[in-house]
Amino acid sequence: MKKKKEMLCLIFVKNKLIFISSSQMTYLITLLYRTCISSALAHKTAEEMRIPPYKINGIKKSETYKREKRLALFIGLSDGAHMDVVRRVGGLSNEQVLTNYYPDKDKLEDMRKELLNDSLLKELDKSDRKFNSLYLIDDFTASGTSFIRKDTDQYKGKLTKIINKFFNSKVNETSRELLLPNVDIHIIFCLATQCAISHIENLLSEFIKSRGLEERISFDVRCVQIIPNRVANEIKNDTTLVDIIKKEKYINKKNVGTKSYKVGHGEQEYFGYGDGALPLVLSHNTPNNSILVLWQDDDDNYPSLFPRINRH
């Protein structure tokens, strides 16, 4: 019986485990700019120039495209966003890239001054030399709850913090002076689950309406590589595998009893945070949305196959 279980686990690792290497993630980040960001800038330029978006060569050579690119603010939502790579691939200015979403006032003031004095924007009135697009970038999301969630009647998460910072009419902050009144927000991931994208789209739309900002903010959620819902469903429907991973000896209560883990409101803790049931491992870390046996540690009994470094 023991050998049979071992063989089943081996088959799972060989046939169902998804491993994203460091080089693959770097490649996804490169594609993120070329496929998601560049295309969004091209469509915005095409609308302004009133030409078909498929005339891509003419669009990218135009002064309008260069101006729209300069009027975009890029913000990394975690260390995994690798904004240094995004900046190099896109040929972006340091004064339009933030490596985190909680910059100090001096940095924001410098960005504002650079916009006012940029020769590329000389044809614009000074009052119009503000960012008209936000690109919010991260490497991965499995549930979307760290970006936006609703606890009772309160919205929380990275996206709500950013919108509150830039659109808080009650506070005269430098961050608010960086943006035009109406802004396009593009939320872009290298890797994301289908359900996380739906979660962010639905809840962010709800949040924006609750703030009365639907006339000022338009947004979309983009992803280089989507993990379809069937990946997790296949794990949940594999009764033989589930019978193994749900055994009490494979569940370390120290891992599933934390405050951050409980935010996911999962019903079956062995499926990982929020019942994610992912067979996924990233080279730099294992998501807690992956099945528990992949990443949890039990100091007294066994080490994990792919140890997780908690970031919350």
Image: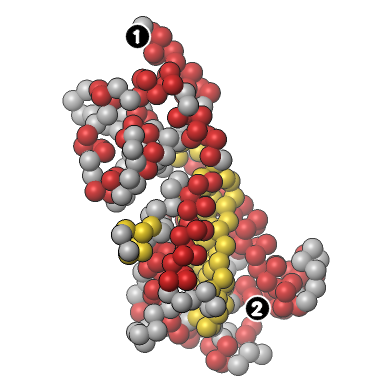
Quadrant containing the N terminus is: top left
Relative to residue 270, is residue 198 depicted above or below? Answer: below
Going by the numbered disc 1, the residue's amino acid type is: Lys
Specify which label sits upstream in the sequence, 2 or 1: 1
- Depicted 71 relative to depicted 12: above or below: below
Which residue is at the front of the view, 152 or 215? Answer: 152
- Label 2 residue SS: helix
* Left or right of residue 148, residue 183 in this image: right
Tell me where residue 134 appears, x and y as whole percent: 53, 70
**Vertical order, 154 against 272 (above or below):** below
Most foreground residue, 171 or 307: 171
Which mark is nearer the camera, 2 or 1? 1
Residue at 25% over, 24% down:
248
Q: Is residue 186 left or right of residue 62?
A: left
User: Across the whole image, how many numbered discs are drawn on residues?
Assistant: 2
Q: Is residue 303 visible?
A: no
**Residue 33 placement (x, y as % from top left):** 60, 58
Q: Position of residue 247 (x, y in %)?
A: 29, 22
* Quadrant in the rendering for residue 239: top left
Identified at 37% across, 34% down, the residue is 271
**Left of 143 or right of it: where is 49?**
right
- The structure residue drawn at horizontal position 74% and vertical position 72%, both measured from the top left corner, is 46
- Near mark 2 (Cα within 10 A), the count class, few <14, some 14-19 or many ≥20, is some
Q: Which numbered marker is on residue 67?
A: 2
Instruction: Return the residue at label 1.
Output: 2
Going 52% across and 83% down the picture, which residue do you hit?
Answer: 181
Q: What colour scheme governs how the chains and residues are painted in the rendered image of this protein?
A: secondary structure
Distance Cα–Cα, label 2 vs label 1: 64 Å
